[in-house]
Image (tube, coloured by chain):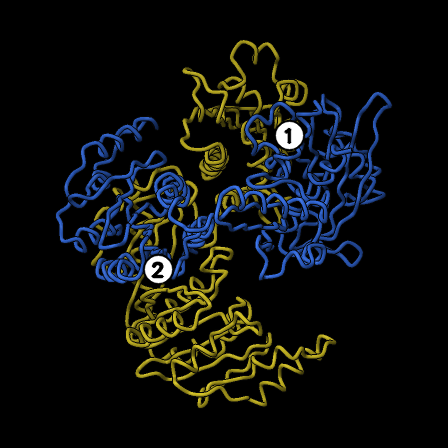
Chain colours: A yellow, B blue
Amino acid sequence: MKAVIISIGDELIMGQTVDTNSAWLSARFADIGIMTIYHKTVPDDPAAIVLALKEACALSEVVVVTGGLGPTEDDLTRHALAAFLNRPLDLHPPSLERIRVFFKSLGKTMPAINRIQAMVPRGVEVLDNDWGTAPGLKMKVGKALVFLFPGVPREMMKMAERDVFPVFKSYGKAVVMTEALHTFGAGESTVAEKLGELMRRDCNPLVGTTVSRGVVTVRIRSEAVTRLLARKHLAATVEKVESRLGKLIFGRGEDTLAGVVGKLAGKIGVRVATAESCTGGLTAKMLTDEAGSSVYFEGGWVTYSNTMKTLELGVPASLIEREGAVSRAVACAMAEGALRQEADWSVSTTGIAGPDGGSDEKPVGTVWIGLGHRSGAGIKTRAECFQFPGSREMIRDRAAKTALNMLRLELLK
Amino acid sequence: MKAVIISIGDELIMGQTVDTNSAWLSARFADIGIMTIYHKTVPDDPAAIVLALKEACALSEVVVVTGGLGPTEDDLTRHALAAFLNRPLDLHPPSLERIRVFFKSLGKTMPAINRIQAMVPRGVEVLDNDWGTAPGLKMKVGKALVFLFPGVPREMMKMAERDVFPVFKSYGKAVVMTEALHTFGAGESTVAEKLGELMRRDCNPLVGTTVSRGVVTVRIRSEAVTRLLARKHLAATVEKVESRLGKLIFGRGEDTLAGVVGKLAGKIGVRVATAESCTGGLTAKMLTDEAGSSVYFEGGWVTYSNTMKTLELGVPASLIEREGAVSRAVACAMAEGALRQEADWSVSTTGIAGPDGGSDEKPVGTVWIGLGHRSGAGIKTRAECFQFPGSREMIRDRAAKTALNMLRLELLK
């Protein structure tokens, strides 16, 4: 069974708004084994909408259309639907009453303009909207079941959960289950080489990779006739991927690198501090993106000036003078300084984020990352040097993530 | 002149990733007067890609395709293109050399798998990728000019800016010039009320507003038969908008709030420090996003624990005990503590970012923001309390930006 998703709106086609409805709908369809064959976004133009509907109904069994059901002059989806079906628009009194009641619940009178939202092409089924004003619409066109919803993500999601997916629960011959395993520390090609024949396109489960901001994600899609089988095959492939990628994998699904570090630190019962120069607070920001991070995050220093490095973290001025602020010695001294309060582990960064400030010896992208650990045996520090490519933003992002990843690998020991 | 945008990727069609490339591309096309007629997203499936290319070339004069040019087995766009054009894939030695050099610059050897990225359908123009491995491709198909780029947004944007938009700059009959004025501190409806009739839809220049992460941007689009006229009308409308919004406007175009604060501080010759609790380093991160920020940014503290607040910033433990960590007194004491090194100005944040930790008296979203200033007359501090809506991420983002905006307004005095 195949689905097509159509998004309607000038604001989408002009790039003023990013369409998130299509991704959400196709993820939900994938959950129940329905394959989306394409998304199409068209403007608030009846001819374009009619064309998109025709194409979709010819090629798929489910069509979900979102957007263009608002009350203003540029909302033309219902007119386009009426033209497509060659039927007139009739007033649907129960919908008009619902819209009136909706406004009343907000202490307002329904503006006259909203009456249009109760107009429905003759013979089309109305789907109540309990979360806004525009009702949804449902009809059969040839072999395709077509749903129309308002474009407001919250309203669309609620209505689709109630009216779309339950209809197909028993339809799908195949059940699809997916998993995403996130890796850090190796490029996409290295990950792909390690995965080897697992990535063949004729495999089921199907294994693919995507990259986003330094994180290479292995995506696995398992299709089978029953949920049990799909899950079993998925688990087997996940296991194979895990055995090939080992500690490169830091998490799955919604996991972030900082979140995983936090969970590990929380589990072991250690506290973490940061001492940042080139990343300028980004590492601390990532660690505190996570709710509940106060359990394991002690705090941090952004020692951008050398004065701050010396007076706040105790990095000797002579050391900075001799080795340079971007050096192993300074990275180690910063990591040590960050242990002055109640932290057990610390990470430090000092480097050249660019675009200026590079030299032949230390080009833009050179970053020393330090790691500090205080235990009964005293304080130990070490540092590694990295060369990150790209813009200032990318260099800072990779440096912070690499620091977190170094800490993760230590905490795993 | 009409454009079509095609996005390719299983991860898009399965909803694991939201496509942002299409919105960006069509916004840039709109800037130069080219109308996008639709976006289409298809899976990594050669048959679907060929079909999408055929349809697009028949209906438009510009086609931009993104995605599926990676080195792995699920990247099938170049194979689909070869099939569509009915031409073989040839090795393009200069591209192979570029990919080798790219890896070398990272201190790595090119994995064998990346060789495929240097394969090009015969006779197709190669567009160098200075920001990654996969080169772009360009060809004429019938009346349509077709561009293919990697799906990585950063690489795609850089290449499109260099290779796509300049080609069409002279095409439009009308000259379109745009300006974007960024405001902070008032909601979209307040800004719209102040703009009043300037926002009428039949105006030229056309004035609209968009909101992104707390920043309300006023977008002005001026269309005229000559560049001179378009610029003149644009300037007149910009002036009207400025006189109505005053200091709400912090910058234009590529300006960021932190960048503007940095420029101001640099111009006046003052140094800035941060003392953060709930924002966890985000304010420092924003300030150091800007190249050259070491000129005005002294450094910062992320005092997440109360111990850190007391021992590092000198906030008396008794004060925290008596007033609570989220209080005017603690925000002021943190701002004062941040002036201990060489900063002239400081900002501090202490609040409840959630999702837990709220109370009736101090619900999630409560943030005290402090401002410190050291001058010949000594140290002065003050703090304001805000109630930010939304998720943890939104609350932290708004708090950091509000701190920067308070500092901006002070530096403007």
User: Which residue occupies 84% across, 30% down?
Assistant: B380
| Sooner in the amino-acid sequence: mark 2 or mark 1 | 2
Q: Nearer the viewer, residue A167 or B408?
A: B408
Q: Residues within 10 Å of mark 2 (few under 14, many from 20)?
A: many
Point out which mark residue A50 bears.
none
Can residue B169 be seen in the rendering of this structure?
yes
**Residue B25 percent coordinates (x, y):** 42, 50
Q: Nearer the viewer, mark 2 or mark 1?
A: 1
Above or below, comparing residue B126 to residue A35 in the picture: above
Chain at numbered mark 1: B
Can residue A252 be seen in the rendering of this structure?
no
Going by the image, does A283 lie left or right of B357? left
Callout 1 secondary element: helix
Q: Quadrant of the C terminus of chain B?
A: top right
Three-letter residue code for mark 2: Thr
Above or below, comparing residue A12 to residue A139 in the picture: above
Point out which mark residue B41 bears.
2
From the image, tell me which residue sits under label 1: B263
Image-quadrant location for residue A49: bottom left
User: Which residue occupies 28% across, 69% down?
Assistant: A224
Three-letter residue code for mark 1: Lys
**Residue A196 percent coordinates (x, y):** 23, 46
Going by the image, does B69 lie left or right of A287? left
Going by the image, does A369 lie left or right of A334? left
